[in-house]
Image: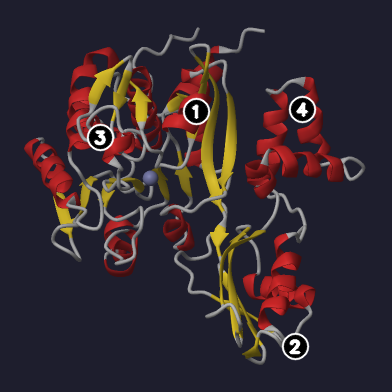
Amino acid sequence: MKPPALAILTACTVLAQAPAIDFTKQKTEILDRYRTLVQMDTTPPAGNETKAVEYMKKLLEAEGIPCQVFALNPNRANLVARLKGNGSKRPLLILAHTDVVPVQREKWPVDPFGAVIKDGYIWGRGTTDDKPHVTATLMTMLLLKRGGAKLDRDVIFLAESGEEADLTGVGINFMVAQHFKEIEAEFAITEGGGATLENGAVVSVNIGTAEKIPARARLVSNGTSGHGSVPRLDNALIHLSAAVERVGTWETPMRLNDTTRTYFEKLALMSTPEKAARYNGLMNPATSQASQQYLRENDPSRWSMLRTSVVPTMLKAGVGLNVIPSEAEAILDIRALPDENIPAFYDQMRKLINDPAVKVEALPMARPASPASPLNTDAYKTLERVAKRMYPRATILPSMSTGASDMAQLRAKGIPSYGIGPASLESDRLNYGAHSDVERLQESSLYPFVEYFYTAVAELAVTAQPPTAAPARR
Ligand SMILES: [Zn+2]
C-alpha cells in the first residue's frame, strides 16, 4: 500500500537529518588519527594520557571547538569539549578512555605501539579497547562542527583517563565527583557493545544497556590454633572449606530483566532451531532448568547473565605444615544483577553457609550499583535504527555485560548510558580482543564504526529541518 504524501512529509520532519558526509573521503583522516592515538603508549601507572589530551585539544581548538582540561594528576588528564546546541534538548555525552592495559612485549609479533597495518588488520595495544572509540568520538565532534549543523542539544566529548584500573581515581570518579556539571547529560554513548562479522557481513550488533555490579566479599572463619597432631572440630580450614563449597556451587535464582529477556528472545531469532529452543526454553518454566544447565556446562558467560554469580577466587590460611591456623579466609568475586539488593543477598549467603564460625564481610565496592538503562529512550532507539540501516542483515541485541565499565558511574548519576563497538569476527574477539596478549582490529571495521557513531549522534542532536522540496499537494 502506498502511504499518503502527508505521512511521508511527517516522517521526514520527525527525523533529524545528519549533514551528509561521504565517509569514503574521511578514511585517510580517520586512519591517521587512529594510528596516532594507538602509537601513544598510555599504559598505567604512568598513563601519560595527557599526551592524547594535548593532541586532541590542538585539533579541536584549531577548528573552533572549545576545550577544558581537568587533571587530578598532571600526567593523567581528562579532556572535555563541547558543541553548543539551542538547549531545546538536554546534552548528549560521548566518551572514550585514552588509557590502555599493559603489554608483554615478547608476546607480540609486531611493535605493540606501532599501529602496524598487516593482513588487513591494524595491530597494537588499544586497537579495540578503546582507541576506536577515542577516534570515533573525536571525529564525530570534528565532522559535526565542519558540517555546520544546528544542534538541539549540546554534544559533550569526554576523553577520560584511568578507566582500566582507576585505583587512584583520576578518571571517571574524579570527573563525577568534582566536575559533574561539565559532563552532565540526558544520555551517554561509549564503549561496551560490539558487532559480529560472519562471511564478510555484520550479523549481529550488540548495544550495551546494563552491567553487573562487582560486590566482592571476604569469608573469614575462626577456630582454635594448635598442634597438627591434635584434630579439632573447630579447625578454621574445615569450616571455611565447607562454606566455600556451599557458596561456590550455589545455584542463585535466575532473574531476567528487560535487557536480558530481549537479548535471549532476539538471539533465538537468529540462531539454529536447536539453539533457539534452548534460549526460548529459559523463559518456559517446564524447560528452564534444562536450558540453564546446558548454559552452565557449555556457555558460562551466558549463564552468568541469568543471575547474580558467586565465584571463589582466593584462599589464604596456614603458617606451617604442623600448625592449625586460628583463621582462614576466602575471597568471593560476586557479580550482582543490576537490581540486586546486596545486603539482603549477603544475608542469604549467611543462611546458606549456616555456620557461626564463618563471617561474611563486604569488601569496598569499586563501582556504584547502577540500574540498567532503558530500551525505550531516544538514544537506544536511534542506535538501533542506525544499526539496522547500516547493517540490514543484522539482529540488534541489547546486552548486559557480566564485567564492569565506567558506564556504572554515569548510570548511577541518572544518565542512561549505551555501549557500542566496531565489528569483529568471533575468532578475533577470542584470540586478539581487548586485553589479550595481541590486540588487533580489522581496518575495514574502523570506518563503518566511526560512521555509525557519527550518524547516531547527529540524529540525536541535529535540529530537524523541514523538507526543502515538499511536493505540492493538489
Ligand atoms: Zn575499555
Foreground residue among 358 and 80: 358
User: Label for residue 90?
Assistant: none
Type of amino acid under label 3: Pro
Question: Is residue 152 something one can see in this rendering?
Answer: yes
Tag 4: Cα neighbours inside 10 Å, few (<14), some, or many (≥20)?
A: some
Type of amino acid under label 1: Ala
Foreground residue among 319 and 123: 319
Q: Which residue is mark 3?
A: 112
As measured in the structure, the alpha-carbon distance from the residue carrying label 1 to the one carrying label 4 is 20 Å
Task: Verify CB contact (< 8 Å) between mark 1 and mark 3.
Answer: no
Question: Is residue 282 something one can see in this rendering?
Answer: no
Q: Residue at x 57, y 16 (%)?
A: 393
Foreground residue among 349 and 460: 349
Residue 277: percent from the left, percent from the top?
81, 29
- For residue 141, which quarter of the picture? top left
As measured in the structure, the alpha-carbon distance from the residue carrying label 2 to the one carrying label 4 is 53 Å
Task: Verify CB contact (< 8 Å) between mark 2 and mark 3.
Answer: no
Residue 470: percent from the left, percent from the top?
41, 13
User: Label for residue 276?
Assistant: 4
Q: Residue at x 72, y 34 (%)?
A: 265
Tag 2: Cα neighbours inside 10 Å, few (<14), some, or many (≥20)?
A: some
Q: Which residue is mark 2?
A: 232
Decide if residue 89 is on the left or right side of residue 352: left
Which of labels 2 and 4 is toward the front?
2
Q: Which residue is mark 1?
A: 195
Q: Residue furthest right?
A: 286
